[in-house]
Amino acid sequence: MAQGRLVIIKTLVLLGFLSVTLKLFDLMILEHKQLAVRAQKQHRAAEPIDARRGAIYDRHYRELAVNRRVESLYGVPREVTDARAVAASLSPFVGSEKTDMVVKRLTADRSKGFVWLARKLDDNSAESIRRLKLGQQIGLAPESFRTYPKETLAAHLLGSVNIDNAGVEGIELKYDEYLRGKGGSKVHARDARGRALSDGGEYEQPGNSLVLTIDEDLQYIVERQLADAVEKWNPRAATAIVMDPYTGEILAMGVNPTFSPEKSDKSENRRNFAISDVYEPGSVFKVVVASAALDLGVYTQYDRFDCSRGSIEVGGRVIRDVHRNGVLTLAEVIKKSSNVGSIKMAMGVGKDRYFEYVKKFGFGQTTGIDIPGEARGLFSTSASYASVSIGYGIAVTPLQLLAAYSAIANGGMLVKPYLVQEIVGPDGETVKSYQPTQVRRVIAENTSRTMAEILSGVTQEGGTAKKAAVDGNSVAGKTGTARKLDMTTKRYSESKYMSSFVGFVPAGDPKLAIIVVVDEPRGAIYGGEVAAPVFKGISEHALVYLKVPREDTKNVLLVSN
Amino acid sequence: MMEAKYEIGRLERARGEALIEQKKLISDRSRLSSPVRVAAVASEKLGLELPSRADVYVVKYDQSSNIVRAKGAYKRRHAQTIDYAGVNREL
């Protein structure tokens, strides 16, 4: 009997060992792969790394675009029991119009463990959602939000990014490959309580930062002056650019109306009028023919043109002066902006030679500025050179004109405008730096000096732009009042004009080249009336800001010990 | 070894939080120092405005002149705005 019991116990023990052995065989051999994967999942966690996009600074390292951490809402469909109830709870924070979308995403695939419901929420909404206590059905994930702390300042230059922080416009797009960081995910072990066991490795590669040529304060001065002009003249749009005429550094570029780069509207306000829109420039273009005439030695600034008839017939068209003038010197033709005198000057130079100068000044080609969307303008050698000499039959961008005037200002060199002066790595090291680029010599140095002298007359007594004159410094520049082509009638409009002023200051030792263009001003049309005061306003504040000394002795106090 | 890994994990979390705070502070500082905001506060609360060309004086050091002459000339020229920006007090 006792032996029988012993046999039973031994058999049971043997069976026990056998079952354990079989289970071990099953766990270690048969199911090893699946279980190993499960163990990995339980003990290792993948943490998403939101790579930091590089910042954008002005020339004095003041932030124009930075990142801020926000939270985004995601759903876990496989945990959701009542999608409609979840959507209803979330609607105050994601928007009632998105309730159906939330339901659709939560129910489309019930096996999914992750779907985005709302990206980049504001802090208050995220906190309110956290308090809803919807358990495992939803979650909040940290994300980086591109923010522009100066709001609309320099919006057209900076551009914007999409929801995934990729550049879509402006500098954000042009330099996206440098700004974008490398993220992905970092996998680390965790214990039974979920605490991370880090190996200390760095898995994020933050993006590089950009240092622009823009000066935040000058940008503000430009935008404020433009806003005042827009309020006064109620135009379709207005733009102003400030550039260092020697280096091509863009110090400010303003466009009005403007937009907020943080908002993703598709409005027309996002167009960068300064570089993307072309227009017939009118009289500001007369400097090209005058420069050509002087540079070739065809005329001197003292040679005279008979403008007493007040009109001239070219190719069957009669072109008139605004006011009837008598006999004018070349300098006076520019000062009084005579169409007749400019056309006679072009005739003296000759079409081919004149058009060579148009090309040398860079018209019909992009300037090469480092921002997307630059237009090349419209220029054809089949155009009437008489028309082109007075700024019709050719279309330019404001930036092209500014580059041309900068060549006159700096002694005759066409320089390439640029916006980014340095790319800086995450640790502050220079990755790439950009230097001023001289494109070509356009006119001789003495021609540029003569042109500067002639253009100084425009802002003096008897000139068309006395309102551009700056207290304490001489200004060289030229007004433009160009009729716009009416695309419906294919004729020049009687009521729509482009008013502009472009020039440089101080005339004898230029520090700034500035262009102001106002599209369809209402109440006044002349460049000397509409754009010249904006030039004056920008110049006066900018010269004070840059501590450029006056050329006269007014407001100078002498002190000694 | 395990202790070190826990410590690294904890420090990484702390660094992450500090970076988030730093980003927020940088953003706030930039927003507060925006020229648009500063100009608005200066004009609305303090009654200040951007100086015009006429408001700016260049002070030059000149051995041949003397401080008394400079003060007298300044006062004669700007009797109405003698307190402007405290320039007279410095002289």
Image: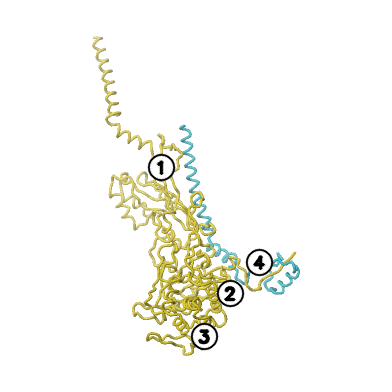
Q: Position of residue A335 (x, y in %)?
A: 52, 81
Q: Nearer the viewer, mark 3 or mark 4?
A: 3
Indicate which disc, 1 or 2, sits on the residue closer to the N terminus.
1
Disc 3 from disc 2: Cα separation: 25 Å
Question: Mark 3 falls within which chain?
Answer: A
Q: Are marks 4 and 2 on the same chain?
A: no
Q: Nearer the viewer, residue A384 or A518?
A: A384
Q: Nearer the viewer, residue A482 or A127?
A: A482
Q: Nearer the viewer, mark 3 or mark 2?
A: 3
Kind of residue sitting beneath label 2: Ser
Which chain is assigned yellow?
A: A
* Residues at discs 4 and 1 in contact (Cβ within 8 Å): no
Q: Position of residue A288 (x, y in %)?
A: 47, 76
Q: Residue at x 32, y 36 (%)?
A: A37
- Please tell me whether residue B42 is drawn above or below residue A486 in the rendered image: above
Please give the residue where the numbered disc 2 appears in the rendered image: A474
Q: Nearer the viewer, residue A90 or A148?
A: A148
Disc 1 from disc 2: Cα separation: 62 Å
Kind of residue sitting beneath label 4: Ala
Q: Are marks 3 and 2 on the same chain?
A: yes
